[in-house]
């Protein structure tokens, strides 16, 4: 029998989430963000499934875009970080990739290039994230240079990225929107990530750029009604491989961080941090065994975890274990592990097979 770990992908859920996303922003075009291996789900599988339903895809860098084109994906693909050296421009043009221009250096590379065909450009404007993008007072000039650049197709898109759109009380989002609105650049605009799509209707503009919500999760700090109907795409599962009874006072696992307070039954599950389960998930983090919740007991190892099943109906080797997914919220595990769901799915290693449900 093969090791039972799998990240099961529900592509119907993915398609459902796209439909829901479109309903929230019916007048905007949809660019689906599938950078970083589609947040760990598997970039080509997700890209192919999304292709018929979206207007464009977005990845971080040209290596990711090449993988998509090699897989036969033909929809427009935006490089969210643009190119990292001028040598990438010819390939980007040949593969008909859309380029982000996030600074004047990237703009100069483009102006000085001689491409066989013009490229479509997105001008990234920094309205308050203070990480990347041209400053607001340079936006006009950069936009004009793009319009005048022979290498650039008509109608460059101006876009910005939110720092705090997941927090309805943070004042920065409105400030970013105000700064973005006050720019006098013409042409199409884009601002909304998933949080923008869900909670900031005045951020939808011509293009929305959701990622996380397409995978079925809400980035919002508080539960948000618009996110209620999203369906998780990934379910991470494994199986029990051993069960043992411990006397009170015995410990489990590395460092003896869990000690039996009573006679206890421990199930060993063959999934660990080498398979994408977070090592810092503490004692008490829930897993589902045969659909029943049970708490983690002892440290997460590379290849296994241990679970206190004393209070469960008879558990035996071979029983199915769900670590997160449609029946156990990713956000709950992320919170226990002191991280966000984005990181948990994105860190899923190649070792864990992706299986289409
Ligand atoms: C990653 C990214 C997104 C998508 O963000 P989500 O929170 O996953 O929706 C949108 N825009 C840019 C520029 C990004 O880098």
Image: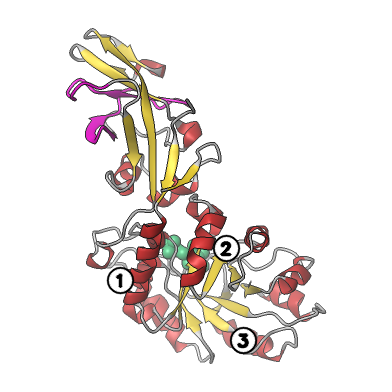
Horizontal placement of 294 versus 29: left or right?
left
Q: Nearer the viewer, mark 2 or mark 1?
A: 2
**Mark 2: secondary structure:** strand
Which residue, given by chain and number where applicable, does mark 3 sit on?
A: 143
Q: Earlier in the sequence, mark 3 or mark 2?
A: 2
Say which of 83 and 177 sits in front. 83
**Mark 1: secondary structure:** helix
Measuring from the top left, give residue 111's x and y in whole percent.
Answer: 76, 81
Horizontal placement of 26 versus 62: left or right?
left
Q: CA distance from mark 3 to mark 2?
A: 22 Å
* Residue visible at 31% across and 13% down in the picture: 251
Measuring from the top left, give residue 133's x and y in whole percent.
Answer: 57, 72
Above or below, 261 relative to 347? above
Residue 309 highlighted magenta (yes or no): yes
Category of crowding for the residue at label 3, using alpha-carbon neighbours closer than 10 angstroms: few (below 14), some (14–19), many (at least 20): many
Task: Please tell me in which quadrant of the rendered image residue 279 appears.
Answer: top left
Which residue, given by chain and number where applicable, does mark 1 sit on?
A: 199
Say which of 140 and 347 sits in front. 347
Q: CA distance from mark 1 to mark 3?
A: 29 Å
What segment is highlighted magenta in the picture? 287-315
Does residue 159 appear in this view? Answer: yes
The circle drawn on residue 59 is 2
Above or below, 221 relative to 248? below
Q: Is the magenta region chiefly helix, strand or loop?
A: loop
**Mark 3: secondary structure:** helix
């Amino acid at each position: 029998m093969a090791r039972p770990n799998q990240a099961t992908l529900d592509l119907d859920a993915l398609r459902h989430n796209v439909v829901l996303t479109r309903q929230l922003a019916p007048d905007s075009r949809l660019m689906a963000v599938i950078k970083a291996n589609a947040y760990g789900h598997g970039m080509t599988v997700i890209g192919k499934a999304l292709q018929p339903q979206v207007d464009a895809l977005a990845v971080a860098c040209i290596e990711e875009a090449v993988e998509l084109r090699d897989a036969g994906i033909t929809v427009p693909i935006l490089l969210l970080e643009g190119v990292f050296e001028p040598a990438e421009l010819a390939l980007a043009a040949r593969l008909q990739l859309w380029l982000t221009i996030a600074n004047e250096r990237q703009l100069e590379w483009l102006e000085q290039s001689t491409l066989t065909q013009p490229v479509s450009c997105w001008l990234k404007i920094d309205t308050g994230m203070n990480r990347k993008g041209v400053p607001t007072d340079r936006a006009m000039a950069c936009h004009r240079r793009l319009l005048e650049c022979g290498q650039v197709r008509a109608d460059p898109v101006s876009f910005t990225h939110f720092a705090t759109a997941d927090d309805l009380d943070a004042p920065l989002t409105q400030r970013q929107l105000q700064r973005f609105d006050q720019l006098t650049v013409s042409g199409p605009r884009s601002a909304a990530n998933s949080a923008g799509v869900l909670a900031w209707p005045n951020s939808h503009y011509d293009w929305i750029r959701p990622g996380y919500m397409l995978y079925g999760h809400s980035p919002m700090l508080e539960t948000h009604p618009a996110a209620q109907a999203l369906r998780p795409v990934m379910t991470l599962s494994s199986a029990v491989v051993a069960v043992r009874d411990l006397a009170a006072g015995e410990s489990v696992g590395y460092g003896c961080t869990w000690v039996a307070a009573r006679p206890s039954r421990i199930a060993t599950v063959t999934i660990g941090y080498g398979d994408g389960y977070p090592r810092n998930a503490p004692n008490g983090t829930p897993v589902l065994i045969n659909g029943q919740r049970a708490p983690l007991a002892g440290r997460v190892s590379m290849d296994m975890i241990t679970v206190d099943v004393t209070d469960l109906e008879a558990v035996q080797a071979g029983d199915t274990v769900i670590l997160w997914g449609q029946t156990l919220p990713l956000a709950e595990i992320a919170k226990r592990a002191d991280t966000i769901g984005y990181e948990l799915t994105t860190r899923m290693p190649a070792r864990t097979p992706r299986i289409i449900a």
